Image (cartoon, rainbow, N blue to C red):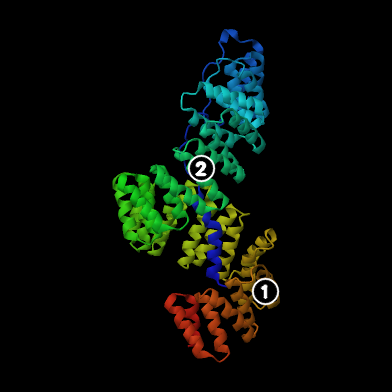
Amino acid sequence: MLLRILWLAVMAISLVACAQVKTDKAVTQSLVAGSVQKDEPMSDEVLVEPSNLSSELLYSLLGGEIAGQRGDVSMASAFYLSAAKRSQDPGIALRAAQIALYNKDVAAAKLAVDILVEDKNASVQAKRLALTVYLRAGDVEKSLSQIRLLLEKNEIPKRNALLAIGDVVSRHANKNTAISVMTVLVGENVKEAGVFVARSQIMSNFSLFNQAQKDANKAVELDANWQTGYVQLAQVLERKGDRQAALLVLKEASEKLKARQLLMVYAQLLAKNKQYLAAKEQLLTLLKHEKNYPEARFSLGLVYLKLDDAENAKATFKALYEDNAFRSKVAFYLGRIADHQKQDEEALGWFGKVERSENYVDAQAAIAIIKARSGDVRGARSVTQRLRNEFPEATSRFYLLEAELLMGARQYDVLYLLLTEAVNENPSDLALRFARSIAATEIDQLVEAEKDLLYVLDKTPSNASALNALGYTLASKTFRFKEARKYLAKALSLRPDDAAILDSMGWLNYREGQYEQALVLLERAYKKTPEGEVAAHLGEALWMLGRQMEAMVIWQEALKRDAGNRYLIEVVKRLK
């Protein structure tokens, strides 16, 4: 087994989510708002004139407010629902419904909005909330009633209103409710392209692609000049797996309508389909007509990167940055280009300009890696420690990032202490346990390494990487070969073509003196992954079989690829 490959496997599993650390996102508003969010402030307006309050009603209102201030949302909801029933006041009912939704109590929210909708002068806000509640409750008739009222009162084009309502139905209704509501809505608006696009989107979300495609085609038929219909049709076809048909729809529609949304979507789908040259030409054509179209310029920069045209990508992104367009995203990609070109100072500068957005964590991680690569391990660690403070919900991921930096710097004692701290904070985190076992092996703390790996295997008995790690540790560091073979045999049964496991089993055969059997497995492993440690093992097997010249060739070739590999350096020094 290769400790380095094993380590990289841990990092691949555990650090891939680094880019997924939550960041703030703008909230878009539509005709019909969604449900009350946890961070949405409640209204502080006076709901009922004090003179109209009975003692019972006052008790309920005060009880609700006090419970809310104490953080007992369930009790606050109960008090406010009682107040709404007693008063039949729309304002109190609205607040009761909001608190019930906040508490995820749909039944209580429905009782409150039943009172609310009796008010013929109910606000648009009230109608929106009522629709959300009825959809969640699965009440088709009452949902449709609120939709009809909203369509009567809306001040935007009906097509847009229908699309907005379809979005709300998609977000708040279960499958049966959504289909029932949209079926009636389509029947009442058979000449509106917007309602067919809305239903197509919902059907597509439920993987009912045939109906989704029919609805999208109907939207195009009703309005052949509406680009949204073509975009929806292409999206359905793509989700069905017919990407070529989707491309054809967008190609023909973009040639016909010359609409920039279609041209952009077409170019993006070409890129997604890895047709980068065609995507580049499409974007360049679009930019001839709209030179300052930021989205197209940004997409073009990404396509240049896919085409390995770093210079054009760099020029495109720099121009966008100077024009104050997508500055944070652009800085991130400029940092990646500089990093790829080994221009460390420039890369650090660009990554440092990335704001707290979707690329922030990746940028900070890149800063840490560059610092460590240049020898500033202390500076690199300060970055990861700061990330742990900024994102406490993701501490284990940043511990693993810091561990990767220490692994690269071969500071194994510090690495073990760091991972012990991490495990103490997150004792059930298997990735941290796995990583600590590797660190323990490096400093010959074999008892601790075995404990961690057995803990991982107790939780995940078919974890091939853990089986491999334990088998290799026993094979290379002890004479417990029978136990090692048990673990490695199971690992091989799970992943028979895995180079690391083949190497581990080959090395076990070598340690047992079975050099011919070792050679077969090590050659297979080296062919799959010509990595330094595998080359070291393969050369040793060849050496013991009297094929010293072949061993030296293998080692020299491997050293050209990885001159600093400690396993190769040690074995060549020992046997040369």
With respect to residue 529, does 381 lie above or below? above
* Mark 1 crowd level (few <14, some 14–19, many ≥20, 10 Å Cα): many
* Mark 2 crowd level (few <14, some 14–19, many ≥20, 10 Å Cα): many
Amino acid type at image mark 1: Ala
Q: Nearer the viewer, residue 394 or 427?
A: 394
Disc 1: which residue: 484
Residue 450 image point, x, y percent: 64, 67
Amino acid type at image mark 2: Gln
User: Do labels 1 and 2 touch, CB within 8 Å?
Assistant: no
Helix, strand or loop at label 2? It is helix
With respect to residue 109, does 370 lie above or below? below
Q: Residue at x 32, y 57 (%)?
A: 312
In primary-sequence order, the first of circles 1 and 2 is: 2
Q: Residue at x 58, y 90 (%)?
A: 545
Q: Which mark is residue 232?
A: 2
Q: Which mark is residue 105?
A: none
Q: Is residue 422 visible?
A: yes
Q: Nearer the viewer, residue 498 or 387?
A: 498
